[in-house]
Amino acid sequence: MPTPAPALALSVSQKSELESLVRSGSTPQKVALRCRLLLLAHQGVANQAIGEQLSLSRPTILALRDAFTKDGLAAVTGIRKRKRRGSVWTPELEQKIIDTTVKTRPGDGSTHWSVRMLARQLRISRTLVHRVWQRHDVQPHRVERFKLSNDPRFEEKVRDIVGLYLNPPERALVLCVDEKSQIQALDRTAPILPLRPGLPERQTHDYKRHGTTTLFAAFNILNGKVIGTCQGRHRSREFIRFLNHLETHLPADQEVHLIMDNYCTHKSAEVQRWLKPKKRSRFHFHFTPTSSSWLNQVERFSALITGRMIRRGTFHSTEELENAIYRWLASWNGEPTPFVWKASADVILDKVRRCKELSETRRLATMPQLRGPVIATLDPRSAVQFRASLARDQNQRAGHDCAQ
């Protein structure tokens, strides 16, 4: 049993001040609680009894008694700060955090570091890890996907399409064409719960499907307007029907350049026959390279209409879905917004070249005798990325070997 603490000595003025603070309605509850603790200690009440009465721990009571003995009433009304030894931010520690993040992986088999996992590994605070990551724009939780085109005419097609974007021909229309297929008319199995302060809109994960439709769209790169129709399928005959629709809505005295992907419907024999008449010689098709639909600006428009109207919409039939799409298109065309293409063909081709180099060097890196010659052929930026990738793979293999 611990020895009972002696009664806390208070002067008349100190006791009067504490009692006044307890009675005052403007005293913060935290301060009033400290005052009651000291008054009970002055009456000789044991620390254990004070803790039970005020719902406080014994270390808290002892700490306040010691602080009052040292600082007097300032210990009651002042703000007491904990003395913490913060991590010292040095250039060496900062570099260690970055190297560990980009060159290694956690030993438990995880694919990437989190703030808390790395802080625990390096025995530092997670706040310090977070600040270093922010400073160097390191985001281990994110991953971006890419696809390299194997089109033998990749450079030619990129320069052709980017040239249309940056320097469109005079007295001609440039339209980006694509179809957004399999748009589902979905109805939720329960009513959607509306947005409220503190709560997002909520909907059930399951749904009732009432059919699908396909949106054929042509995006004008100059003014942002869209010509669109909805059809039940997306075969050659539906595409030709859309081309006829385009023909009736475009000026007859202008050249028309259509940018589209390599979907077989766009290259079918029926479409080639549609282009044969002399009156349609003004239509020029420009195809994006394979696996490069990101070059087509209408893909950005498809993402907009999906995010703003289709994904969270509720539709009881394909007719209702198509009417909603037409209303959205009419609203968009009322205040159209063209997209601004900034990347030149040289910039795009340079990025693709670096990606292909890294992809090829990763394959050759499986042969140790070729690593030195391979690195010597890379530009400085690619060489740094390649070395970091090799180091990360080696550390991961070492971790697996230790685990086994």
Image: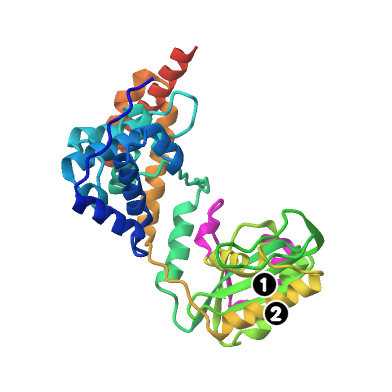
Return the x and y of residue 266 as percentages of the image width and height.
67, 63
User: CA–CA distance between discs 2 and 1?
Assistant: 14 Å
Looking at the image, can residue 268 be seen? yes
**Which of marks 1 and 2 precedes in the sequence?**
2
Circle on res. 293: none
Indicate the position of residue 217 as horizontal and vertical percent values.
64, 72
* Amino acid type at image mark 2: His
Q: Is residue 119 left or right of residue 224?
A: left
Q: How many marks?
A: 2
Residue 290 drawn in magenta: yes
Element on which disc 1 rests: helix
Q: How far across and how far down the image is residue 76, in percent?
A: 26, 49
Q: Tell me which residue sits at (67%, 67%) in the image.
A: 310
Task: Determine if residue 386 is in view.
Answer: no
Q: In this view, does 329 lie to the left or right of 191?
A: left
Frontmost of labels 2 and 1 is 2
139 relative to 87, above or below: below
Q: In this view, does 294 lie above or below 91?
A: below
Mark 1 lies on residue: 275
Measuring 58% from the left and 79% from the top, which residue is drawn there?
332
The segment highlighted magenta reads 267-296
Q: Nearer the viewer, residue 137 or 183?
A: 137
Residue 64 lies in quadrant: top left
Decide whether residue 287 is among the magenta residues.
yes
Question: How many C-alpha atoms fall within 10 Å of the one at disc 2: few (<14), some, or many (≥20)?
Answer: some
Pick the front one: 70 or 112: 70
Q: Position of residue 83 (x, y in %)?
A: 23, 38
Q: Name the residue under label 2.
A: 245
